[in-house]
Image (tube, coloured by chain):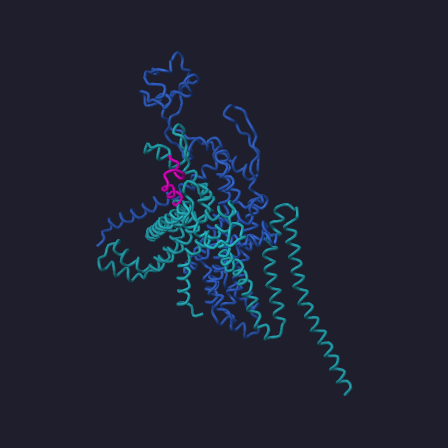
């Protein structure tokens, strides 16, 4: 028998474990979010968690090392140590730290205390650069400045939209027609074709890239939006057809039959009855496909390739990653912007997305 | 008498004209539709309009075009005599999908297989030479080792974490929030995930402050040397890449397990509790067997997904430092080295790896479907 006390402990354990998992899980994303608001220099120098108040050594005094010989042990503020040790930081008597900054000939001594500090230089600069391509003044270590043209992601954003919307709607349309045909029409080859659909569910898209690319080049449509739409349609059709078939084949027969009796043609029944009734299934797959296309990198890389004008967000982001170090501040805000739309779509339509997953899980 | 003959003659003439008219219109309308579409295509490819105009036109053209094609095709077919309509219309519905599937997936399988038997430029027939390379070259052996790690470790952890969170969340007050937050990474692209995890794995010199979270812990709390997590310590560096994908796809497993767990009949759970079973025993003896089907489905889906991993590896390490996988090696052989033969052979190897699942699916289909 469970005493109420042990039940409460049990609940604490469960909620506690869950909370720990969720927090650890979200830390990487939070890290990026915080970093996107930080100054360019700060990102390169300190970790993003220093934005929050923490205890660290802060310099309270600085002076030149008069009369000290770095080649031997030195005594500073009553503490004796070698040059190398002072370089790393030697604990002082009061809990602080004595630091030698610089090299043997050119340096200074810093007395540091342990204090609460935070590097709270938050700025919207990164977003400005990345969205509007604003120019930014950057101070180099030696004090001079240079202006840098920001990277404009708006073009890539529009390209992503231009690719994702049709690449979502077109497969759904085609799959809906086909699913209806499989479910409610009789024709020779019906079973064979559907077996083909099921078989193609697991074929990796790498199989198609080489032949299709060759076709596109020969037809001179490579790099166009149409090429990418058709590719995404091809890769998404098996799952779409399968999901929609499962749904449409389970619609109540009587409604459809009475429509046929009333003289409606297949097309009219499809337009006026099937499509409206299938909205949940259509929506589920639409979200699934939209996220997949929006976040896709390989298909865009292969079929859009180097056409800088038509690059989508994932390509642009990957390009920024390649330029190590110098443009990391752009990466932070850029990455967050690319994630914003899918996150919004996901949160707003979570229910449909989950339902779509559940429906698709029946087949690998 | 004469009037009636006259009537018949007129009606035949009218009927012929009418039929001709219908045929003409039936040909003209599709041609017109096609013409409009083609103009749109040329505009999109060559025009110099502002970006958002092009994007809008593209969307309208793409979506509207497909809808229009279907509408026109159906319209044409429905103007035909009844029997023709009945025989042709199914192909209007199913035809485009079948054609696309064949051209984009079924046919390429054969073409890729054919190309895999040829040399780098697809000129000569070289038999199984590319497959010999694929299975014996040292770089490929590293690839197979890595893919094995990915499949075994990645799947194990994704499924385990998904199951764990599903079970915990099921009993918790914060179920919906927790599940949403765990699932959230699924909406992030692999490239975006690469950026995020760069901030975790970044390595700096000992003298400088660490800006990567992992190194900050490692150096600050454990007093170790800063590590290049994804570059050194092969093959362990693969684990850090695998971690990223586990982070991304555990949400998927969690959602499916959550639904499955909620589907376990409460009577069984109650019976177990009445019999005095502890929580753990109930879990292993009642819940797990009840959801074994879902576990199998999730595992196979994750396995297939993991076999195709490309983005994360390509973006984080480019396949270097012994992190190459099948998909990145495929990309490198075909797009970087321009070797059609080897690239195709590697793609076929990938296909072969998923054929067991295909057979399983088809078997299930045969059993279930009253088609």
Image x and y of residue B166, in percent:
35, 52
Name the quadrant of the N terminus of chain A.
bottom left
Residue B172 visible to an observer of this rendering: no
Q: Residue at x 52, y 35 (%)?
A: A125
In this orientation, which residue lies closer to the viewer: B257 or A224? A224
In this orientation, which residue lies closer to the viewer: B223 or A249? B223
Image x and y of residue B87, in percent:
56, 72
Q: How many marks?
A: 0
Q: Which residues are magenta?
A: B227-242
Image x and y of residue A271, in percent:
56, 65
Q: Residue at x 22, y 57 (%)?
A: B276
* Colour of chain A in the rendered structure image: blue
Image x and y of residue B366, in percent:
41, 67
Up/down of A36 relative to A304, above or below: above
Which residue is outermost to the right? B2
Apparent side of residue B42 relative to residue A118 in the rendered image (left or right): right
Q: Main secondary structure of the magenta part?
A: loop
Residue B370 visible to an observer of this rendering: yes
Which residue is outermost to the bottom? B1
Q: Is residue B271 magenta?
A: no
* Colour of chain B in the rendered structure image: cyan
Where residue B317 sits, quadrant-wise, is top left
């Amino acid at each position: 028998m469970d005493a109420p006390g042990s039940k409460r402990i049990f609940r604490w354990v469960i909620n506690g474990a869950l909370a720990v998992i969720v927090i650890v899980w979200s830390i990487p994303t939070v890290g990026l979010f915080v970093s996107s608001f930080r100054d360019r220099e700060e990102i390169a120098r300190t970790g993003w968690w220093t934005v929050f108040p923490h205890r660290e050594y802060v310099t309270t005094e600085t002076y030149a090392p008069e009369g000290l010989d770095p080649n031997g042990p030195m005594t500073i503020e009553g503490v004796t140590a070698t040059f190398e040790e002072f370089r790393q930081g030697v604990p002082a008597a009061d809990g602080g730290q004595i630091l030698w900054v610089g090299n043997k000939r050119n340096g200074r001594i810093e007395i540091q205390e342990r204090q609460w500090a935070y590097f709270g230089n938050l700025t919207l600069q990164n977003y400005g650069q990345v969205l509007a391509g604003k120019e930014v003044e950057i101070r180099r270590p030696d004090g001079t400045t240079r202006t840098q043209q920001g990277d404009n992601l708006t073009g890539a954003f529009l390209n992503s939209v231009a690719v994702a919307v049709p690449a979502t709607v077109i497969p759904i349309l085609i799959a809906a027609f086909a699913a209806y045909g499989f479910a409610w029409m009789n024709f020779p080859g019906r079973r064979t074709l559907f077996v083909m659909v099921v078989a193609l569910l697991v074929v990796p898209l790498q199989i198609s890239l080489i032949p299709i690319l060759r076709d596109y080049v020969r037809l001179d449509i490579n790099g166009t939006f149409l090429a990418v739409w058709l590719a995404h349609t091809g890769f998404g059709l098996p799952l779409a057809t399968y999901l929609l078939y499962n749904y449409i084949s389970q619609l109540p027969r009587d409604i459809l039959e009475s429509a046929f009796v009333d003289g409606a043609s297949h097309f009219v029944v499809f337009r006026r009855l099937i499509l409206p009734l299938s909205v949940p299934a259509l929506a589920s797959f639409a979200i699934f496909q939209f996220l997949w296309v929006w976040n896709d990198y390989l298909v865009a890389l292969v079929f859009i390739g180097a056409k800088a004008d038509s690059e989508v967000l994932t390509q642009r982001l990957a390009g920024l990653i390649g330029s190590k170090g110098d443009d990391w501040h752009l990466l932070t805000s850029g990455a967050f912007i690319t994630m914003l739309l899918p996150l919004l779509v996901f949160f707003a339509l979570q229910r449909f997305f989950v339902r779509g997953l559940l429906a698709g899980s029946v087949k690998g | 008498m004469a009037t009636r003959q006259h009537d018949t003659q007129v009606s035949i003439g009218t009927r012929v004209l009418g039929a001709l008219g219908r045929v003409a219109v039936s040909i003209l309308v599709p041609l017109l539709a096609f013409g409009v579409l083609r103009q749109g295509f040329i505009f999109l490819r060559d025009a110099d309009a502002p970006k958002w105009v092009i994007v809008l036109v593209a969307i309208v053209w793409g979506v509207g075009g497909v809808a229009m094609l279907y509408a026109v095709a159906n319209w044409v077919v429905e103007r035909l005599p009844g029997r023709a309509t009945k025989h042709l219309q199914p192909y209007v519905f199913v035809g485009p999908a079948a054609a696309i599937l064949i051209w984009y997936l079924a046919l390429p399988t054969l073409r890729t297989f054919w190309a895999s038997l040829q040399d780098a430029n697809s000129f000569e027939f070289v038999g199984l030479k590319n497959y010999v390379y694929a299975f014996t070259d040292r770089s490929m052996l590293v690839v197979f080792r890595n893919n094995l790690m990915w499949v075994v470790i990645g799947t194990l952890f994704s499924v385990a974490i998904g199951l764990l969170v599903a079970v915990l969340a099921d009993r918790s007050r914060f179920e919906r929030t927790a599940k949403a937050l765990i699932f959230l990474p699924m909406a992030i692209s692999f490239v975006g995930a690469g950026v995020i995890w760069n901030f975790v794995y970044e390595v700096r010199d000992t003298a400088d402050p660490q800006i990567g979270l992992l190194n900050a812990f490692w150096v600050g709390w454990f007093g170790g040397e800063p590590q290049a997590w994804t570059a050194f310590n092969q093959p362990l560096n693969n684990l850090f890449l695998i971690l990223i994908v586990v982070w991304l796809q555990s949400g998927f497993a969690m959602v499916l397990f959550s639904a499955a767990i909620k589907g376990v009949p409460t009577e069984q759970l109650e019976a177990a509790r009445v019999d005095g079973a502890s929580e753990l025993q109930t879990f292993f003896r009642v819940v797990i067997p009840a959801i074994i089907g879902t576990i199998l489905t999730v595992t196979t889906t994750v396995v297939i997904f993991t076999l195709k991993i490309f983005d994360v590896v390509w973006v984080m390490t480019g396949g270097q430092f012994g992190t190459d996988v099948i998909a990145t090696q495929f990309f490198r052989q075909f797009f970087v080295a321009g070797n059609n033969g080897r690239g195709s052979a590697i793609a076929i190897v990938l296909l072969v790896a998923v054929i067991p699942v295909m057979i399983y699916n088809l078997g299930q289909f045969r059993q279930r479907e009253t088609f």
